[in-house]
Image: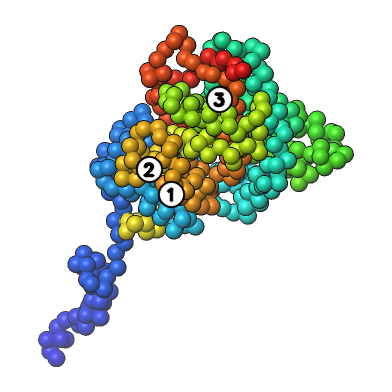
Amino acid sequence: MEAMAQFPDIEANYLLLPIFLLPLLYLIFKQWKYPFATKSPPIPPGPTPWPVLGNIPHMGRLPHVTLCNFAQTYGPLICLKLGTQYTVVGSSPAAAIEILKTHDRSLSARYVPKVVPARQEELNRSSIGWTEVCNDGWKYLRTLCRTELFSVRALDNQSCLREKKISDMVEHLRAKKEGQVVDIGELVFATIFNMLSNVMVSRDLIGLEEESAGEGMKSLVRTVMEVATAPNVSDFYPLLCKLDLQGLRKKSTNLGIKIRAAWEPIIEERRRQGAPLTLSQEDFLDTLLQNNFTNERIHQLLMELFTAGTDTSTSTIEWAMAELVKNPESMMKVREELGREINQDLPKESHLMQLPYLQACIKETFRLHPPAPLLLPHRAPEACQVMNYTIPKNAQVLVNVWAIGRDPGIWDEPLKFKPERFLSCSLDYKGNDFELLPFGSGRRICPGLPMAARHVPLVLASLIHCFDWSLPEGKDPQQLDMNEKFGVTLEKEQPLLLIPKARS
């Protein structure tokens, strides 16, 4: 007792001891990994990032190819750090199923590049592609577009418009371009753009001879796509976003203004005129006006529909024509099939289901040259577990469908254009077969898939049925340049230039 009296604070110190010991015990508990302790799985493997820059120096000129090579080293789910931001990439059907199906709800948020000019609040009200989450506004827009543009009823009603644009294209080639060099991408872009513009605003917006140089619509749309995929410091280091150090956001805004000028006077004219007299006179713009859309909402929606709908389909048709020119046996099979099934001058949409080899050629083109090689970027709003790995919170999540389409573990002779592979299997590109996902899958699947499934084969069939095609200066088709140019859309690095000869 006397000893205790000499140290009156000892009893009080013993009472405080647990307060100091508890944090220490917690750290020891985590470090020793007791069997009953919980620990999140690691993030997916990947190349070692550099200080500050992360994996930016590793990406190269063709990121989809680089990521495919990384997958061969590190596995089907990899993680990179681009600046301060994590990016997770799936490169196999199993990884695609996990991202787009099993964890679709958790990963269906959108990673929005900083180059997108609209404010996020406006995008969340007016955008199909760039809403951060699948909110009520996004659901409403998807439903409206599905009903008015992409339903079977709507597509059947539009068929005469598409067939009229096909007739215009063929007559243009016969009257003005036979025997001359034709830029297939330019021609197809103008045709598909006018197919869409007649559905949207009931008129052509560009001419079939519009040049890509200067301020042509195709040039503007392609430049928008190039700006959207340019490496952007603001994406790698979001703290620098407001500075727009490369001027990409400003450039994207100016390009958007130029593109919108094509239809802005039409909107104002339509507002003055009021509702059409009959339902048969209505187009998509009338529907938007009747639903009290502001000009800004109309601009955002039309911008997305025009740019996504034209550039991806143009790229697919250009690649398909290039592959068929380079593979004359396949071209001959398509031509023989068209000759058997079409007893008139021009193909019609009613013929498309009777052309299995043509459809196989389109699937094979989607496999080798998917229009969006990495799809559009998803985002993980919260950390989640995929394939026994942890996807970090707010990580960008990509699916490398280009890598899946060239995987020798899935495809026999994957680098060879061989449409016959699709004649003996039921694989389709509608989002249910994860070996072939050009339009994605799940909640964020491309809403325009049903329309693309009509106008891509219709344009391709018309070009092949009505004309023979050769390379300029008698060049050997086997020497055709098939190099790629990476972007939101996977383009040919060199435009496809061909000479048409009308078939009798």
Q: Quadrant of residue 221?
A: top right
Say which element carries label 2: helix
Do residues under tags 3 and 2 come within 8 Å of each other at their CB atoms? no
Q: Earlier in the sequence, mark 3 or mark 2?
A: 2
What amino acid type should be assigned to the residue bearing mark 1? Phe
Q: Nearer the viewer, residue 455 or 347?
A: 347
Can the viewer see residue 8? Answer: yes
Question: What's the distance in space between the residues labelled 3 and 1, CA to CA?
Answer: 30 Å
Q: Quadrant of residue 239?
A: top left
Say which element carries label 1: loop
Measured as percent of width and height from the top left, residue 182 is found at: 55, 15
Above or below, comparing residue 40 to residue 95 in the picture: below
Q: Earlier in the sequence, mark 3 or mark 1?
A: 1
Residue at position x 47%, y 11% from top?
472
Say which element carries label 3: helix
Q: Nearer the viewer, residue 426 or 285?
A: 426
- Residue matched to label 1: 434
What amino acid type should be assigned to the residue bearing mark 3? Ile
- Residue matched to label 3: 464
Measured as percent of width and height from the top left, residue 499 is found at: 53, 14
Can the viewer see residue 295? Answer: no
The C terminus lies in quadrant: top right
What amino acid type should be assigned to the residue bearing mark 2? Ile
- Residue matched to label 2: 404
Do residues under tags 2 and 1 come within 8 Å of each other at their CB atoms? yes
Question: What's the distance in space between the residues labelled 2 and 1, CA to CA?
Answer: 9 Å
Residue at position x 35%, y 37% from top?
414
The N terminus lies in quadrant: bottom left
